[in-house]
Amino acid sequence: MSEAFDSLLDGLAPVFDLPEDFARARTQWLAGLLNLGRHTVTGALSTAGSQHRDWSADYRLLQRLPVEPIFAHVRTEALAATDATRPWVVALDDSITRKTGRCIPGCGWRKDPLGPPFNVNFIWGQRVLQFSAAMPADDGSARLVPVDWQEAPLPKKPSRHADAQAQAAYVEARKQANINKVAAERMAHLRTATQRPIHWVSDGRFTNRTLLRQLPENTVLIGRVRKDTKLYAPYAAQPGKNGRPRKYGDTLPTPEQLRVDDTVGWTRVSAFAAAKRHDFKIKTQGPVLARITGVDTLVQVVVIAPLGYRLKTGGKLLYRQPAYLICTDADVPLAEILQEYLWRWDIEVNFKDEKDLLGVSEAQLREPEAVRRQPACAVAAYALLLLAGHKTYGSNRLPPSVPLAKWRRREPPRRATTGLLINQLRVELWSRHLRPDSLSHFCSRTRPIHKSDKPATDLASALFYSHN
């Protein structure tokens, strides 16, 4: 896998003005993936063995990293990994990266999305927007790879004693920093990456009038909507009537009214989710008009029945919440809408990996450009790692060098997780520097010794199983 990763990294050499800048950036990205401690800049330098050298050049490099050309290379590789005859499926979502420093540009108090529903918690951090492209597999599953990372800070609120001009400037800056407006601008930029149709997939945060009425050409948005969304039939103009012409036809049932309507039957659709295929009960309505999309867009509304589950064998049957989807193209097949929306969950996995395994928010920086560019390039390196794993092992094979621990062999992971890919990278890059006998028991099982020696720390196990 290291060869595929090196090949992808070599493709970034032309975007740097100086060869030494590329060599420095390559070392930082690779050390950031292999780092066993905190993912700070000094942590990456220590992993690369540069802790006794001058570090100023490495910090200065972070202020001029070419973020957009780097992600352009990632998008090119992500497009090449998918079927060119199919639409390009891209999920979008926002998140908050936690910070501790009070002098970091772009940071502020944000609502904690993981807080309990009965109390609003606040955390100090940065707001970011990410786009992840899907790489479908033959079994219906898909892995999402980040193809764009955009910092979306909010302007600082002026003092209550500020003059009217400062207050008006803040209101205008707040409008420009709206997360849906930022998402629309990035979607227009990503539209230029390919001529293929693009299917955007989002949650309810981005399924609103601000975004739906600014979609680029040849794109479709599949997102979650409220259960009381107003729907209307297309209006057929009637000649001979005076007054302002109507734009909407008769009022149709809302998605919730459609769900409880017994006169409309359920349709079963099979889709891949949660490591296996499921049969979902679906109701659909369309083509119809919606207030949030306007009169120029005919949409398709999809209602997904709540799934039943049991906490234990023989326990009470419980139900999750129903889902209400909208698709801005009434001709997209129902099974395709459902499957692409289910793929969206993998962007949450991306955020989890970026925060927990890669520590994209742990770098201690204060220069505005470095604060903006360093996390974005760390996410780009993570995307190249996923692409290298996909090229090497495909969709369902696992790295062979480090066998799974005994307690994981009964239910092995369905695909190569980020932790397994990082461990595989460590094995290929570090094992040659360890003694050969340190890795002997990784390749074959040894006979159990009932009277063994006192336990000792195993360096290879500590390195290659640190994130399993």
Image (cartoon, rainbow, N blue to C red):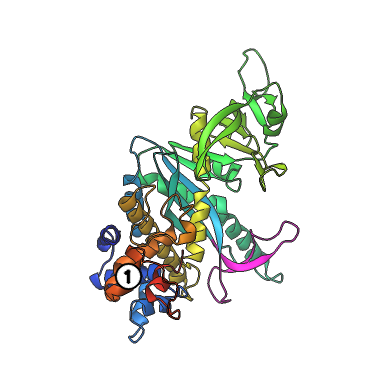
The question of residue 112 being in magenta is answered with yes
Residue at image coords 33%, 38%: 84
Specify the farthest residue to the right: 118
Residue 464 screen position, x and y as percent: 39, 68
Residue located at (38% from left, 55% from top): 386
Question: What quarter of the picture does the N terminus occupy?
Answer: bottom left
Q: Main secondary structure of the magenta part?
A: loop
- Which residue is located at x 54 percent, y 55 percent? 94
Residue 66 visible, this orientation: no
Q: Which residue is mark 1?
A: 439
Badge 1 crowding class, 10 Å Cα cut-off, few under 14, some 14 to 19, many 20 or more, is some
| SS type, badge 1 | helix
User: Camera-side residue: 164 or 254?
Assistant: 254
Up/down of 7 relative to 317, above or below? below
Q: Which residues are magenta?
A: 98-127
| 443 with respect to 409 (left or right) | left
Q: Position of residue 277 (x, y in %)?
A: 51, 38
Query: Farthest residue toward the front?
Result: 451
**Could you tell me the amino acid type at mark 1?**
Leu
Reply yes or no: does residue 408 show up in magenta.
Answer: no
* Residue 390 image position (x, y, % from top left): 35, 51
Residue 283 shows in this picture? yes
Image quadrant assignment for residue 53: bottom left
